[in-house]
Image (cartoon, coloured by chain):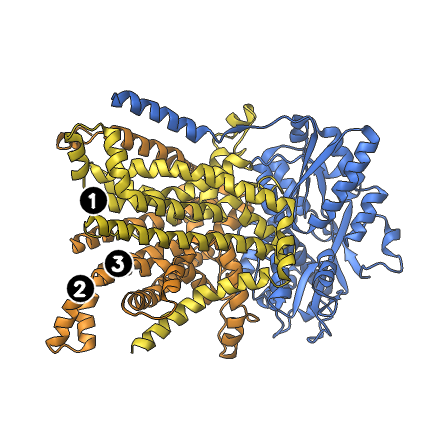
Chain colours: A yellow, B blue, C orange
C-alpha cells in the first residue's frame, strides 16, 4: 500500500516534471559543452539576458513595495470592499497573458487611447523597454502581496499595538516588529515574483516588437532561436532559465528551513500560510 | 513623525516610480534603420544588411545600422499599426502592407506601384516537402486530398505563408475544374480535412513536420523547403514540385511617415532599391529566393524547381479581394473549418 | 476609512490603502478599463454574435473542459503526492518536494517546447502512448497535459500543510476504536483536507483557464478541435479585429474574475475551518 502510493506519486511527478527537465538539458548538451557555450555567446542572446534582468530589477522592487502596502492595509484594518480588493490583486494571475499584453497595446499603441498624446511627445512605451517592464509588472502584481496577506492576517496586530503603546513610531513598529515577523514570507514572495518576471512570455511577446538585440527578452530569444532551427542554443538558453528556477527552489527550501528554525526558537506556533505560492 | 507629510511624499514618489519607465526616444548621431520583416527572411537580411552597410559607407561615408524584427507577417503588420516604428517593412504578402496603409495611413495606398515588379524584389513559390523516397508517392495537389494522407501547413489566419499555400491549392482546383468555385471549395476543404496540426507560423510547422515527425507532406515556401533540406539533411527529406503553383510575391515598402520622422527616407529608399541590385539579387538566390532576373533561375545549377506558375492577380484579382473572400472573419476558410470539425 | 480608524491605533491606513489603490489603478485597473471601453465600440448585437460564434463557443468549451479535467487530475494526484510527501520517508523525497514548485518557476514557453518534444508521437512518452493508440500532443489530451503541468503545484501546496498539521493521534485513535483504514481516511482525514483541496482545485482551474505559452506548442491549434480561447483572441488580433478580440477577452476576464472570487470565498472558509 505504502510503496504503491509512493510509486504512483513518483511516477506522476516523473512523467510531468522530471522528464521535461531532462529533455531541456539533454538537448542543450547534445553537442557537448562547446555547443552549449557557443549557443550563449551570441550578442543578441546577451542583450536578451540583459533586458530580462532589467525588467526583473525594475518590476520586483515595485511589487515588493506594493505587496507590503497592500498587505498592511488588508491585514491590519477592516474596511468595506476588502474582498473585492483582494480579487483585483489576484486578477493578473489568471488573466491570459495575451489579454494582459493586449491591454497595454490598447492603452499605449498608436491606435490606443494614449497613442496620439505619446506620439506628439515622441515617447515610446510599447515596442520598447518601458512596455516590457509594464507587462512584467502587470503579471507579477499578485506574488508578494499574496504571500504576505494570509500570514499578516494570521499574525494579527497585537505586536505592533504593543510597540506603539511603548512609544514607538509607526515606521519603527513596521521595521522593528512587522518586517522581522514576515521576512521569510517576504523573501519567498520576492523569489516567486522574480521567477515569474524572468520567465514571462505571452504578455511580453505582444508588446515587444521583437527587435533583435533591443526588445527581445530571454523567453522571446528562445523562441527566435527555436524558429531559426538553432535548437541547441535555444535549449541552452532555456536551461539557463531552468537553472534559475532550480536555484529558486533551493533558495526557497533553505528559507523554509530557516523560518522553521526561527519559529522554533521563538516558540510561537507555526503560522504557515495556507495560501500557496503563486 | 508627520504621517500626513510622509504619506504624501511617498505617494508622489510612487507615481514617479510608476511613470519612470516612460523613456524618451534617444537621438543618436548614427543612422539606424528598423526593418520589420517576417519569419523566414532572418538569414537573408542578416547578410544583406552587412552588404548594404558596406555599400552605403563607400557611397556616402555615413554609417548605417540596420535592426531587424522578425515574426509572423500579420503580427508584424499589426505591430507597425500599433506603433512599432519601422522605417521599412518587408513582409510575406501585399495584404499585410495594405492593412498598414488602411489602418494607420503611414504610407499611401498605392505603395505597391512605387518599386519595380509589384514592389517584390524577390519571389518564391509553394512546393511540397515529403519524407525521403516519397513513401506516399505524392506528385501533385490532387494527391493531398486523398484519404490517409496527412498534410502539414500553418494556419492561414495567422501565417502569411499559409495563405499562399491555400491560394495555390485553390488556384490549382479552379484550373482543373473549369473555374468552378464550388469544386475549388470542395477541394480545399478536403485538403484541410487531412491537416492534423495548424501551427501559428511557418517555422512552427517546419518543426512539427521535420522535428516531431508528424505528417506525410509539408506545404511550404520553396525557399523554406530548400532550407529544410540544408538544415535537416537532404538524406531525410525531398522536394516535390506540383504541376502548377502560385508566384508568391513578398513585397517591400518604405513607411513614409516613420522614415520622415526619423529623417531616414533617403537611406531607407536606397536600402530597398539595393535589393534589386546584382548584390541583392545574388544574395536572394543564395537564400533560395527566386530573383527577378530570370537568367538566374535558368542556370544549370539553379536549385529552383521548374513548374508552371500563376500570379495572384490573374486568379483572384488582388490581395484585398482574396483576403476578403477567403480569410476574413466568416470567410471561406472559416466556413471550411467549421464544416470539417 | 474613519470606521477603520475608530477601533485601531495602528497608523498608515491612509498611506497604504491609498498607495495600494493608486498602484492597482495605474497598473491593473486603467489597462482593464480600456478593454471594456474598446468592447463598448460594438453594438450589443455585434458583441453577442462575436462572443457566441461557433468557434468562440467551442473555444470556451474546450478551455473550460480541459481546465476542469486538468484540475481534477491534479486534485487526485496532488492529494496523493501531498500524502506521500508528508507521511512517508523515502530516498529522494526532499528533491521531489522541491521539484513540485518547478512549474511556478519555469517559463511556460520552455515547458511547452519540452512537453511537446516528450509527448509528440516521436517523443519518448508519445511513442509509447502511440502504441496503445493514444495521441497526446496535437490533441485535446495535449492541452490537458500542459494545463496539468502549469497548475500542478496548487493542490499539493494547499493540502500539504493541512495534512502536516493533522494530528496523527486522531487517526490512531480512530484505528484503535476499530475503524478500518479507509474508514479512517474517509471519516477523519478527508473532511479535514476537503476545504484546502477545493481551494487547490479552484486555483488549478483558474490558472489553467489563463494558460497560453505552453499550450500553443503542444495543442495543434485546429479551429473547432484544439483551439483554446487565448489563441482565438490572438487570431482576432492578427485579423486587425480589435473589437472582436476584446469582446472574447471580456468573456474570459469575466470567467477569471468569477473564478478568483470563488477561490477567495473558499479560502475564507478553509481559514475558518482551520481556526
What chain is tagged by disc 2?
A: C
Q: Are marks 1 and 3 in contact (CB under 8 Å)?
A: no
Q: Are marks 1 and 2 in contact (CB under 8 Å)?
A: no
- Report helix, strand or loop for mark 2: loop
Pick whichever of labels 2 and 3 is earlier in the sequence.
3
Left or right: C244 with respect to B199?
left
Let me know if marks 2 and 3 both belong to one chain.
yes
Judge if badges 1 and 2 mark residues of a common chain: no
Residue occupying image coordinates x 63% and y 46%: B70
Residue A89, image x and y in percent? 33, 42
Where is residue A83 drawn, in percent x and y? 25, 43
Q: Which residue is mark 1?
A: A155
Horizontal and vertical percent position of residue B187: 64, 65
Q: What is the spatial separation of the Cα atoms under label 1 and label 2, in whole angstroms? A: 22 Å
Secondary structure beneath dot 3 equals helix
Instruction: For marks 2 and 3, give the CA distance.
Output: 12 Å
Q: Which residue is mark 3?
A: C161
Residue under label 2, please give it.
Answer: C167
Any part of residue B339 in sight: no
Taking depth in this image into account, of C110 and C163 the one nearest to the observer is: C163
Query: Where is B224 relative to C79, above or below?
Result: above
Residue at x 40%, y 45% (from the top left corner): A193
Amino acid at each position: 500500500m505504502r510503496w504503491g502510493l509512493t510509486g504512483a506519486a513518483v511516477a506522476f511527478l516523473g512523467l510531468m516534471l522530471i522528464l521535461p527537465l531532462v529533455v531541456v538539458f539533454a538537448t542543450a548538451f547534445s553537442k557537448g559543452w562547446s555547443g552549449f557555450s557557443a549557443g550563449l555567446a551570441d550578442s543578441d542572446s546577451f542583450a536578451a539576458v540583459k533586458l530580462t534582468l532589467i525588467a526583473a530589477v525594475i518590476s520586483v522592487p515595485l511589487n515588493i513595495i506594493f505587496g507590503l502596502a497592500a498587505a498592511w492595509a488588508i491585514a491590519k484594518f477592516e474596511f468595506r470592499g476588502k474582498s473585492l480588493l483582494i480579487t483585483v490583486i489576484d486578477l493578473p494571475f489568471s488573466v491570459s497573458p495575451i489579454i494582459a499584453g493586449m491591454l497595454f497595446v490598447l492603452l499605449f499603441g498608436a491606435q490606443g487611447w494614449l497613442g496620439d498624446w505619446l506620439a506628439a511627445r515622441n515617447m515610446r512605451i510599447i515596442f520598447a523597454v518601458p512596455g516590457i517592464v509594464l507587462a512584467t509588472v502587470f503579471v507579477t502584481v499578485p506574488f508578494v502581496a499574496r504571500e504576505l496577506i494570509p500570514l499578516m492576517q494570521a499574525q494579527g496586530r497585537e505586536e505592533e499595538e504593543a510597540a506603539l503603546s511603548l512609544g514607538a513610531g509607526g515606521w519603527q513598529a513596521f521595521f522593528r516588529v512587522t518586517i522581522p515577523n514576515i521576512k521569510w514570507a517576504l523573501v519567498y514572495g520576492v523569489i516567486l515574483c522574480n521567477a515569474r518576471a524572468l520567465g514571462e512570455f505571452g504578455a511580453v511577446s505582444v508588446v515587444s516588437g521583437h527587435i533583435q538585440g533591443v526588445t527581445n527578452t530571454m523567453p522571446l530569444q528562445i523562441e527566435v532561436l527555436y524558429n531559426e532551427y538553432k535548437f541547441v542554443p535555444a535549449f541552452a538558453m532555456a536551461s539557463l532559465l531552468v537553472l534559475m528556477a532550480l536555484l529558486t527552489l533551493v533558495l526557497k527550501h533553505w528559507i523554509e528551513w530557516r523560518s522553521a528554525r526561527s519559529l522554533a526558537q521563538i516558540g510561537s506556533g507555526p503560522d504557515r500560510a495556507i495560501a500557496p505560492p503563486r | 513623525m508627520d504621517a500626513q507629510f510622509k504619506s504624501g511624499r511617498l505617494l508622489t514618489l510612487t507615481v514617479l516610480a510608476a511613470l519612470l519607465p516612460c523613456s524618451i526616444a534617444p537621438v543618436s548621431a548614427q543612422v539606424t534603420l528598423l526593418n520589420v520583416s517576417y519569419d523566414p527572411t532572418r538569414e537573408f537580411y542578416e547578410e544583406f544588411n552587412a552588404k548594404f552597410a558596406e555599400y552605403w559607407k563607400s557611397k556616402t561615408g555615413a554609417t548605417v545600422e540596420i535592426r531587424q524584427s522578425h515574426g509572423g507577417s500579420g503580427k508584424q503588420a499589426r505591430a507597425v499599426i500599433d506603433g512599432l516604428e519601422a522605417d521599412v517593412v518587408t513582409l510575406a504578402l501585399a495584404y499585410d502592407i495594405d492593412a498598414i496603409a488602411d489602418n494607420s495611413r503611414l504610407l499611401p495606398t498605392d505603395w505597391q506601384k512605387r518599386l519595380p515588379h509589384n514592389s517584390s524584389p524577390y519571389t518564391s513559390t509553394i512546393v511540397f516537402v515529403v519524407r525521403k523516397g516519397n513513401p506516399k508517392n505524392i506528385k501533385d495537389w490532387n494527391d493531398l486530398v486523398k484519404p490517409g494522407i496527412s498534410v502539414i501547413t500553418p494556419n492561414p489566419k495567422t501565417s502569411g505563408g499559409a495563405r499562399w499555400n491555400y491560394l495555390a491549392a485553390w488556384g490549382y482546383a479552379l484550373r482543373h475544374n473549369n473555374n468552378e468555385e464550388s469544386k475549388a471549395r470542395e477541394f480545399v476543404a478536403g485538403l484541410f480535412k487531412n491537416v492534423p496540426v495548424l501551427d501559428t507560423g511557418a517555422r512552427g510547422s517546419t518543426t512539427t513536420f521535420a522535428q516531431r515527425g508528424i505528417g506525410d507532406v509539408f506545404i511550404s515556401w520553396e525557399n523554406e523547403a530548400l532550407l529544410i533540406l540544408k538544415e535537416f539533411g537532404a538524406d531525410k527529406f525531398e522536394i516535390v514540385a506540383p504541376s502548377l503553383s502560385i508566384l508568391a510575391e513578398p513585397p517591400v515598402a518604405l513607411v513614409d511617415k516613420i522614415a520622415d520622422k526619423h529623417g531616414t527616407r533617403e537611406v531607407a529608399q536606397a536600402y530597398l532599391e539595393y535589393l534589386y541590385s546584382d548584390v541583392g539579387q545574388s544574395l536572394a538566390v543564395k537564400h533560395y529566393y527566386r530573383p527577378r532576373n530570370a537568367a538566374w533561375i535558368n542556370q544549370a545549377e539553379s536549385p529552383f524547381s521548374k513548374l508552371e506558375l500563376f500570379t495572384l492577380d490573374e486568379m483572384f484579382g488582388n490581395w484585398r479581394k482574396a483576403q476578403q473572400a477567403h480569410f476574413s472573419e466568416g470567410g471561406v476558410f472559416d466556413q471550411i473549418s467549421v464544416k470539417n470539425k | 476609512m474613519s470606521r477603520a480608524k475608530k477601533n485601531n491605533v495602528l497608523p498608515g491606513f491612509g498611506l497604504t490603502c491609498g498607495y495600494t489603490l493608486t498602484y492597482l489603478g495605474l497598473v491593473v485597473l486603467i489597462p482593464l478599463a480600456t478593454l471594456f471601453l474598446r468592447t463598448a465600440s460594438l453594438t450589443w448585437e455585434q458583441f453577442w454574435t462575436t462572443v457566441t460564434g461557433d468557434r468562440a463557443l467551442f473555444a470556451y468549451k474546450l478551455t473550460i473542459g480541459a481546465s476542469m479535467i486538468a484540475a481534477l487530475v491534479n486534485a487526485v494526484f496532488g492529494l496523493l503526492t501531498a500524502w506521500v510527501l508528508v507521511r512517508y520517508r523515502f530516498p529522494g523525497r526532499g528533491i521531489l518536494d522541491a521539484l513540485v514548485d518547478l512549474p511556478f518557476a519555469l517559463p511556460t514557453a520552455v515547458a511547452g517546447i519540452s512537453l511537446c518534444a516528450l509527448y509528440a508521437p516521436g517523443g519518448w512518452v508519445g511513442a509509447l502512448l502511440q502504441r496503445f493508440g493514444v495521441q497526446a500532443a496535437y490533441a485535446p489530451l495535449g492541452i490537458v497535459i500542459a494545463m496539468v503541468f502549469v497548475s500542478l503545484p496548487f493542490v499539493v501546496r494547499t493540502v500539504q500543510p493541512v495534512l502536516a498539521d493533522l494530528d496523527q493521534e486522531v487517526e490512531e485513535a480512530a484505528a484503535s476504536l476499530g475503524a478500518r483504514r479507509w474508514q479512517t481516511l474517509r471519516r477523519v482525514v478527508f473532511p479535514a483536507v476537503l476545504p484546502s483541496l477545493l481551494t487547490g482545485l479552484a486555483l488549478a482551474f483558474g490558472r489553467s483557464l489563463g494558460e497560453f505559452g505552453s499550450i500553443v506548442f503542444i495543442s495543434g491549434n485546429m479551429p473547432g478541435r484544439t483551439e483554446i480561447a487565448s489563441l482565438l483572441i490572438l487570431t482576432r488580433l492578427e485579423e486587425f479585429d480589435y473589437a472582436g478580440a476584446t469582446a472574447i477577452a471580456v468573456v474570459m476576464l469575466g470567467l477569471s474574475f468569477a473564478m478568483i472570487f470563488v477561490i477567495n470565498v473558499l479560502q475564507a472558509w478553509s481559514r475558518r475551518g482551520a481556526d
